Amino acid sequence: METTQTEQTSLMPAQPQKEHQWLQKFVGEWTYESEVMMEPDRPPVKSTGTETVRSLGGLWVLAEGQGEMPGFGPATTLMTLGYDPQKQCYVGTWVGSILTHLWQYEGELDAGETVLTLNADGPVITGEEKIGKYKDAIEFKSNDHRVLTAHMLTDDGQWQHFMTTHYWRQQ
C-alpha cells in the first residue's frame, strides 16, 4: 500500500503548539463550589467537590471531578480538552456518572487569552426530550482561580445563565 505525503505527516507525533501550552494552566488539584439555578423562581442550589487535572502528552488535559451534582447526588465527571490544528479550534468532551450523553465541545480562546468558550449540544435541562445548545465559558481570574459559567440557548433565542462554578487550585 502506497502512503501519500499527507498521510505520512498525519502519522507523525504531534508537537504541542501555543494553544496546547495554554491548556496546561488547568493541570493541578482543585476544589470547587458550584451554584445551579434549577428553577427560575427559586434560589440557586450549591454544591462542592474536587477536581484532578493532568496532562496527556502536553496535547490534552484530562479533568476528573468528584462531588455532588444538584438534583442527582454524588457524581464523577471526566472532561477532556485539547486543540485541533486542522479545525483551528479547541475541542473536548464531557461525561458524567449521572448522564448517558457524551458532550462534545468546540470553542475558542478570547483575544486576551483568559476566557475559553466551549459550545456543545445536549439534552435540555427543562426535562423535555430534546437537544439544546449550550455555551460554557471558562475564565482564568488568576493562575489559581478559574470560573466556569454555563448558558443554555432558550426557545426565544436568548442565552440563559444557569450555573456558575468557582475552582481554586490546591496545588
Image (cartoon, rainbow, N blue to C red):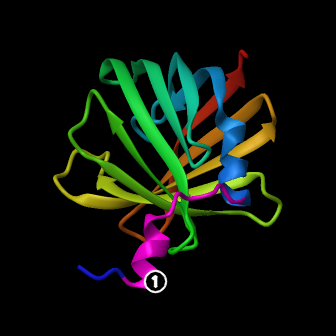
Q: Is residue 106 magenta?
A: no
Q: Is residue 38 above or below residue 16?
A: above
Q: Is residue 22 above or below residue 75?
A: below
Q: Position of residue 69 (x, y in %)?
A: 39, 24
The one of 55 and 12 positioned closer to us in this rendering: 12
Question: Which residue was labeled with disc 1?
Answer: 5
Residue at left 55%, top 22%? 52
Q: Is residue 41 above or below residue 169?
A: below
* Span highlighted in magenta in the image: 4-17
Q: Is residue 139 above or below residue 169?
A: below
Q: Is residue 11 magenta?
A: yes
Q: Quadrant of residue 74?
A: top left
The one of 3 and 145 positioned closer to us in this rendering: 3
The one of 98 and 40 positioned closer to us in this rendering: 98
Left/right of residue 54 with respect to residue 28 in the rendered view = left
Quadrant of the rendering where the C terminus is positioned:
top right
Q: Amino acid at mark 1?
A: Gln
Left/right of residue 108 with respect to residue 69 in the rendered view = right
Q: Residues within 10 Å of mark 1 (few under 14, many from 20)?
A: few
Q: Position of residue 75 (x, y in %)?
A: 35, 20
Residue at left 50%, top 63%? 12
Quadrant of the rendering where the N terminus is positioned:
bottom left
Q: Position of residue 95 (x, y in %)?
A: 34, 38
The one of 105 and 41 positioned closer to us in this rendering: 105
Residue at left 72%, top 22%? 169
Residue at left 35%, top 67%? 155
Q: Quadrant of residue 157?
A: bottom left
Left/right of residue 84 with respect to residue 23 in the rendered view = left
Farthest residue to the left: give it: 129
Q: Position of residue 34 (x, y in %)?
A: 55, 27
**Number of residue marks:** 1
